[in-house]
Image (cartoon, rainbow, N blue to C red):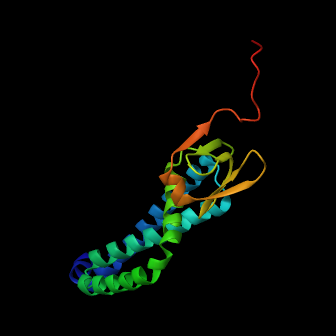
């Protein structure tokens, strides 16, 4: 029986394919749990958590597909030609939308590396405007900052990664008198 499986290429590929699918599911579950814990630790909104999980699903499915085709020996040259054609068309079609894509990419980076959390008082180093206040939400395209006058500032994600951001220790309207 084992000799038959070793000699039959189709059965061997099916067995490897099943192992890859099981491995993919296990990998996906472990990473999902890790992302859930990280999202809870960073106190992000449900929509943001769902966006990050969906982004991970798309990326991991692409990676799994590539590994699957390479290991099973499916015509890699044909697949790479097909994928490069799709990416070329998407690249041209989405070129006009670069700012939207950069905001989505920045949103993923902010999820993993942005040192400030919702509720923190921050000030963005903006020369022409006062962009400071309480960080009230981080969405897929922008961060929301409640200014001291009550107005809500919508600031793009890609710009908040490019500008200096200062965490304010004290709320400007809540200064403490020392009694000197």
Looking at the rendered structure, the number of numbered marks drawn on it comes to 0
Residue at the spot 48% in from the left edge and 66% down from the top edge: 102
- Quarter of the figure with residue 47: bottom right
Residue at the spot 34% in from the left edge and 81% down from the top edge: 14
Q: Is residue 32 visible?
A: no
Q: Residue furthest top?
A: 180
- Quarter of the figure with residue 73: bottom left
Q: Is residue 46 visible?
A: yes
Location of residue 104 with respect to 66 vertically, above or below? above
Residue at the spot 47% in from the left edge and 67% down from the top edge: 25
Residue 172 x %, y %: 72, 35
Residue at the spot 53% in from the left edge and 70% down from the top edge: 100
Quarter of the figure with the C terminus: top right
Residue 161 x %, y %: 50, 53
Closer to the camera in the image, 106 or 125:
125
Residue 1 x %, y %: 27, 79
Residue 167 x %, y %: 59, 39
Closer to the camera in the image, 162 or 120:
162
């Amino acid at each position: 029986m084992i000799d038959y499986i070793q000699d039959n290429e189709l059965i061997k590929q099916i067995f490897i394919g099943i192992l890859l699918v099981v491995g993919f599911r296990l990998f996906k579950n472990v990473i999902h749990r890790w992302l859930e814990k990280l999202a809870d630790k960073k106190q992000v909104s449900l929509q943001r958590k769902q966006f990050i999980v969906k982004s991970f699903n798309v990326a991991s499915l692409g990676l799994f597909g590539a590994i699957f085709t390479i290991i099973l020996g499916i015509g890699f040259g044909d697949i790479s030609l097909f994928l490069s054609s799709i990416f070329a068309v998407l690249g041209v079609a989405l070129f006009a939308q670069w700012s939207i894509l950069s905001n989505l990419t920045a949103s993923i980076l902010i999820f993993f590396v942005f040192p400030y959390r919702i509720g923190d008082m921050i000030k963005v180093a903006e020369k022409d405007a006062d962009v400071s206040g309480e960080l009230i939400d981080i969405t897929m395209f922008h961060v929301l900052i409640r200014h001291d006058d009550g107005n809500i500032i919508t600031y793009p994600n890609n710009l908040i990664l490019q500008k200096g951001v200062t965490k304010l220790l004290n709320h400007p309207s809540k200064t403490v008198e020392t009694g000197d």
